[in-house]
Image (tube, helix red, strand yellow):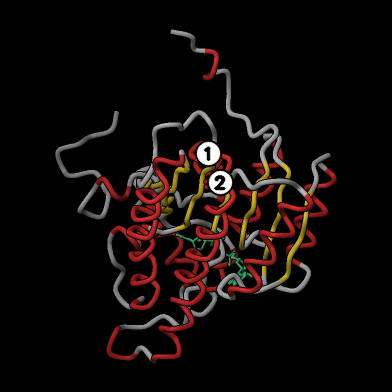
Amino acid sequence: MSRERFAGLTHKGHVAFVTGAGSGIGRETALTLADLGADVAVLDWTPGAANDTATEIEHMGRRALAFTGDTGDERTIVDAFARTRETLGEVDVAVACAGVLGQGGPVFETSVADFEQVMGVNVRGSFLVTREAAKGMRKQKSGAIVLLSSLDGLQAEHGMFSYCTSKGALLNLARAAALDLARDNVRVNCVCPSVTYTPLLTGRLATIPNGDAVLASYAERHPLGRVLTVGDIASAIAFVTSSIATGITGAAIPVDAGIGATWDNYRDPPWVHRG
Ligand SMILES: NC(=O)c1ccc[n+]([C@@H]2O[C@H](COP(=O)([O-])OP(=O)(O)OC[C@H]3O[C@@H](n4cnc5c(N)ncnc54)[C@H](O)[C@@H]3O)[C@@H](O)[C@H]2O)c1
């Protein structure tokens, strides 16, 4: 059997579409895909953010396209995919990274407005990206879509009701879409990060008085002894959307520094002595 197709991780010749690409995981994913050879369309609703990422991609010698808009808005996503096809070509890789935490809070304090905003961005936005990407991918009989779920999708976090609900929904969104698209050779997966050092995290930590201590305790509780970096997540996304990962679809892939492997807060038990 030839092993030529395992020659290395590349996105040479691919066109990628990444939402939330103005910051954090989405930005790093867009830059990583460009670094691996892709031309990349980026979308973000923060003014100037998509443009900044697109400029950086062009400096890397790739073609880029920037859109400023809301991923939860149907017209925005339909138009952005149409322009990407016209300008860069058919989309091979789509990554729905745009996401919001919402107000945070337990179910008994969650407003309908907060719930709808979080579901609107995290779930409707991911649905729209999946649907629009799938249309062209079906025609070319290939493509890979990744949705950003979370460890909060695989399990739940106390006091983050809207967010956990939205991230859990994405797991079955990916499975259902993966089944609908499997015979067209279009793969759909979720990547599920644990705590990742991004502006989303630092923004949340800034709202509490002991943010630094909370960050240190997050790091301590992960078996690898640290929180995740944007590079940890972007490299997993680059792998699962590449033509190396031909057999992975409908999966929820944790990138969690080992925390999902333990039910206990990770620490050495009394009978383990490090040499
Ligand atoms: N940081 C973490 O610890 C962590 C952990 C698990 C999952 N995630 C998920 O990863 C994804 C990226 O998170 P991040 O930490 O990089 O966040 P971030 O805040 O650094 O970046 C998110 C980007 O998405 C954009 N965005 C938000 N809502 C949008 C909308 N409606 N339309 C267009 N753009 C929008 C923001 O402007 C921002 O640039 C999110 O879906 C998040 O839920 C993050």
Amino acid beneath label 1: Lys
Left or right of residue 230, residue 32 in this image: right
The mark found on residue 141 in the picture is 1
Residue 161, position as x, y percentages in the image: 33, 77
Mark 2 surroundings: few (<14), some (14-19) or many (≥20) residues within 10 A: many
Q: Is residue 76 toward the left or the right of residue 235 in the image?
A: right
Which residue is at 57% across, 59% downward? 132
Q: Residues within 10 Å of mark 1 (few under 14, many from 20)?
A: some
Q: Residue furthest top?
A: 1
Q: Position of residue 232 (x, y in %)?
A: 52, 44
User: In the image, which disc is placed on residue 230?
Assistant: none
**Please, what is the three-letter code of the amino acid marked with disc 2?**
Met
Q: Of residues 249 and 152, which is closer to you in this image?
A: 249
Give the image location of residue 9, x and y in percent: 58, 28
The number of discs equals 2
Are discs 2 and 1 less than 8 Å apart at CB?
yes
Look at 61% across and 48% down and name the residue there: 29
Label 2 residue SS: helix
Instruction: Report ligand 1 position as a quadrant.
Output: bottom right
Q: Which residue is mark 2?
A: 137
Q: Is residue 209 something that shows in the picture?
A: no
Q: CA distance from mark 2 to mark 1?
A: 6 Å
Is residue 123 visible in the rendered structure shown here?
yes
Q: Residue at image x 54%, y 42%?
A: 143
Between 172 and 229, the one lying in front of the other is: 172
Residue at image position (52%, 68%) is: 125
Quick one: SS at disc 1?
loop
Q: Position of residue 147 (x, y in %)?
A: 47, 56
Identity of the residue furthest to the front in this view: 139
| Residue, far left | 271
Looking at the rendered image, the quarter that the C terminus falls into is: top left
